[in-house]
Amino acid sequence: MRKLIVYSHFWKSDEEIDEWFNSKRLFFILSIGRSGTKWLANLLNKALRALVVHEPFIEAIPHQEAFHDPKKEIYLRVHNHDIDIYGEVNSFLRRHCEALRKAFPNAIILHLVRDGREVIRSIYSRETMLSGAYDTKYVCPKPEDPYHRKWDKMTCFKNYVGIGHREVLGSLSIL
C-alpha cells in the first residue's frame, strides 16, 4: 500500500497577497525560445535581494488550483524569500502579455529579441521543434491547415518557421 503525504498551506486573503506584491518590484521578460532567456535569468538573479526565475514549471506549484490565479501561484512559490524584486524570464508567457498587464499592473514587461538567424542556429544545435520533442510535441497546425497532415514529416526548420507564421495568423493548435 502506498502512502500519500499531504501538506497543508496557509491561505492568505487576496488583500494580503496584493499587499505583498505592492511591496515588491516585479518584472517579466518575454521572448521566443532559444533567445538567451536562461542565461539572462541567471545573470539577473545575482542582484542583491532579487529572485529571478527562468520558466518555472507546474511541478513547482504547491497547489494546482492556484495555477489559475497567477498572483497566488507566484506568491506560493516565493513569499518565503526575503526579496525586494521578483522577476520572471519566461518564453511561455509571450502569448499572455495582456493577462500579465491585468494581473500585475505595476510590473515592468520587457520583450527580449534575438537575431532570428541566431535563434535558428540555436534550434539546430538542439533537439527541438522535431516531432515528439518535449517542448513542442503538442504543437501543430489546426486540422483545417493544409500542413496539418505533413507536420510530423517536416524538418525542424520548416516547423519552426511554420509555428511563427501560424502563431501570427492564429491557426496554431496547442493540444
Image (tube, grey):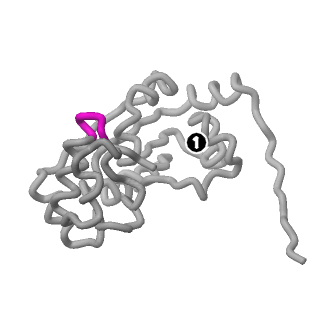
Question: With respect to residue 65, does 156 lie above or below?
Answer: below
Please state which amino acid type lies under the numbered disc 1: Ile
Question: Split into 4 quadrants, where in the image is the N terminus?
Answer: bottom right
Of the pair 99 and 165, the residue shown nearer to us: 165
Q: Residue at x 71, y 27 (%)?
A: 16
> Where's residue 6, x and y in %?
83, 58
Residue range highlighted in magenta: 167-171
Question: With respect to residue 128, does 163 lie above or below?
Answer: above
Q: Residue furthest bottom?
A: 1
10 horizontally vs 28: left or right: right
Of the pair 81 and 147, the residue shown nearer to us: 147
Q: How many marks?
A: 1
Question: With respect to residue 119, does 141 lie above or below?
Answer: above
> Residue 42 is drawn in which quadrant?
bottom left
> Where's residue 114, x and y in %?
17, 50
> Residue 124 is drawn in which quadrant?
bottom left
Question: With respect to residue 175, does 1 lie above or below?
Answer: below
Q: Residue at x 70, y 25 (%)?
A: 14
Label 1 Cα neighbours within 10 Å, binned few <14 / some 14-19 / many ≥20:
some
> Where's residue 67, x and y in %?
61, 42
Q: Residue at x 19, y 43 (%)?
A: 165
**What residue does disc 1 label?**
74
Q: Residue furthest right?
A: 1
Q: Residue at x 35, y 32 (%)?
A: 109
Q: Is residue 8 magenta?
A: no
**Under tag 1, what secondary structure?**
helix
Helix, strand or loop: magenta stretch: helix
111 horizontally vs 104: left or right: left
Of the pair 141 and 85, the residue shown nearer to us: 141
